[in-house]
Structures are given as structure tokens and as C-alpha cells.
């Protein structure tokens, strides 16, 4: 029974990875972020395992994509992000001192 459960879980994760890969491949070469947001739809969001999705522009907090969130909740999220905006801006996804960081930021 455990083996079947593990197999089902692995198949589900593989399906989601394939979906993400296909989405990434379809977006290669798309430089306009608005076009990227247009390609994201509720079906894709659900297929990768989410019931809801929210994408905000970090500069002006305009909603770029919303599936399932109420306006009041979105306003709460905007307020929280705004309070911590300076801290969030300083967070790096690429560690300082790494080769990739040097290539990107020291040109």
C-alpha cells in the first residue's frame, strides 16, 4: 500500500514538474512581463497545486494576477508588503560574493 501511495505522489510531482517545464519553455523569449501574466490562468495555477494565486507589482502594488482572493485580503497583503518594502528590497536571492552575483552586479 505504501509503495502505491509513493508512486502516486511521485507521478503527481512529475506531472507538475512537466507542466512547469512546458510553461517555462513557452515563455522563453517573452520579455514583456504583461504577456507572461496573460499566459497564467486558473487551470495552470490549479495544475501546479494551488487553489489561489496573487501577483502584485512590487513598485506600485498593482494587481497583475488574482485568482481567488478577496479585495480586503489583497489590501492587507499590500499594507504588509508596504510596511516591510525596504527590508524586502535588500533580500537577495543570489548570495553576495558568489560567482553569479559578481557576474550580474559587477559589470
Image (cartoon, rainbow, N blue to C red):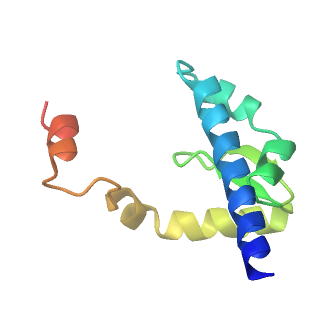
Quarter of the rendering occupied by the C terminus: top left
Which residue is depicted at the point 75% across and 37% down? 40
How many numbered marks have been drawn onto this rendered protein structure? 0
Q: Position of residue 19 (x, y in %)?
A: 70, 41
Q: Residue furthest bottom?
A: 2
The percent position of residue 37, horizontal first and vertical second, equals 69, 34
| Image quadrant in which you'd find residue 3 | bottom right
Residue drawn where x is 47% and y is 69% of the image: 84
Q: Which of 42/83 is in front?
A: 42
* The one of 107 and 21 positioned closer to us in this rendering: 21
Q: Residue drawn at (73%, 49%), measured in percent from left and top?
A: 15
Residue placed farthest to the top in the image?
29
Report whether 42 appears left or right of 2. Answer: right
The quadrant where residue 28 appears = top right
In this rendering, would 29 be left or right of 98? right
Q: Nearer the viewer, residue 45 or 90?
A: 45
Residue 2, image x, y percentages: 75, 81
x, y percentage for residue 53? 75, 55
- Of the 4 image quadrants, the one containing the N terminus is bottom right
Residue at x-position 83% and y-position 61%: 51
Amino acid at each position: 500500500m505504501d509503495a502505491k501511495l509513493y508512486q502516486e505522489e511521485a507521478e503527481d510531482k512529475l506531472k507538475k514538474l512537466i507542466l512547469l517545464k512546458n510553461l517555462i519553455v513557452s515563455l522563453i523569449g517573452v520579455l514583456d512581463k504583461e504577456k507572461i501574466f496573460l499566459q497564467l490562468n486558473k487551470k495552470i495555477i490549479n495544475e501546479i497545486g494551488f487553489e489561489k494565486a496573487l501577483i502584485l507589482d512590487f513598485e506600485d502594488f498593482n494587481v497583475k494576477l488574482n485568482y481567488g482572493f478577496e479585495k480586503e485580503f489583497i489590501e492587507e497583503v499590500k499594507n504588509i508588503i508596504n510596511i516591510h518594502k525596504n527590508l524586502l528590497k535588500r533580500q537577495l536571492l543570489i548570495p553576495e560574493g558568489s560567482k553569479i552575483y559578481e557576474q550580474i552586479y559587477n559589470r
